[in-house]
Amino acid sequence: MSQESIYTIPLRYRKMENLHIVFWLFKDVAWCMVWKPLGILMIFPTLLISIVIAWRTRQYMSEWCHNLAITVWISANSYWMISEFLKFDTMKLYGDFTFKHLAIIPFAIGLLVLGYYYLIWKPKHPHDLETM
């Protein structure tokens, strides 16, 4: 028998994560099909559940950082979708930058969170239990 630690997820949390995927897919399908009301409506449960998942995993740095990155990814993705739906995505903001390009801010925040985890936190905590 291995001495490896086991990370388990309570069933009610797993069910919430699975439902989160359903909402996320509905949001992105609505975006693809330009079903504006459904796409905008699906932002709320998708984002809310991702925040709850991040909060519940905060005691595990690996899980928390990855779930926080997912939350800001969904935020960026949702802003981008709304900018296309409301047709301000191609409006000039500054130079060649359009309002759609503002989505880079939350995308970059997600990359910074993961960069912090992999480049700073993980090397300083090589023996801590984690899931990644």
Image: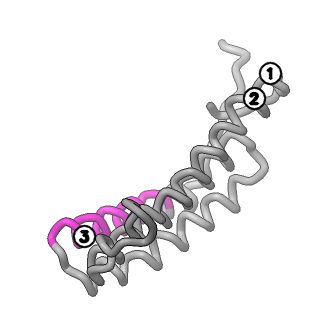
Residue placed most toward the observer, 2 or 48:
48
Q: Residue furthest top?
A: 1
* Residue under the image location 46 percent in, 79 percent down: 44
* Numbered label attached to residue 31: 3
Quarter holding residue 86:
bottom left
Label 3 vs label 1, nearer the camera: 3
Q: Magenta segment range?
A: 17-33
* Residue under the image location 61 percent in, 66 percent down: 51
Q: x, y percentage for residue 60?
A: 74, 44
Residue placed most toward the observer, 84 or 114:
84
Residue 88 sits inside the magenta stretch? no
* Residue under the image location 80 percent in, 21 percent down: 126
Q: Residue furthest bottom?
A: 37
Residue that label 2 marks: 122
* Numbered label attached to residue 3: none
**SS for dot 2:** helix
4 to 23, vertically: above or below: above
Dot 3 crowding, Cα within 10 Å, few <14, some 14–19, many 20+: many
- In the rendered structure, the answer to whether residue 85 lies left or right of residue 78 reads left
Label whose residue precedes the other's in the sequence (3 or 2): 3
- How far, Cα to Cα, is label 2 from label 1? 6 Å
* Residue under the image location 75 percent in, 29 percent down: 122
**SS for dot 1:** loop
Residue that label 1 marks: 126
Q: Quadrant of the C terminus?
A: top right
Quarter holding residue 97:
bottom left
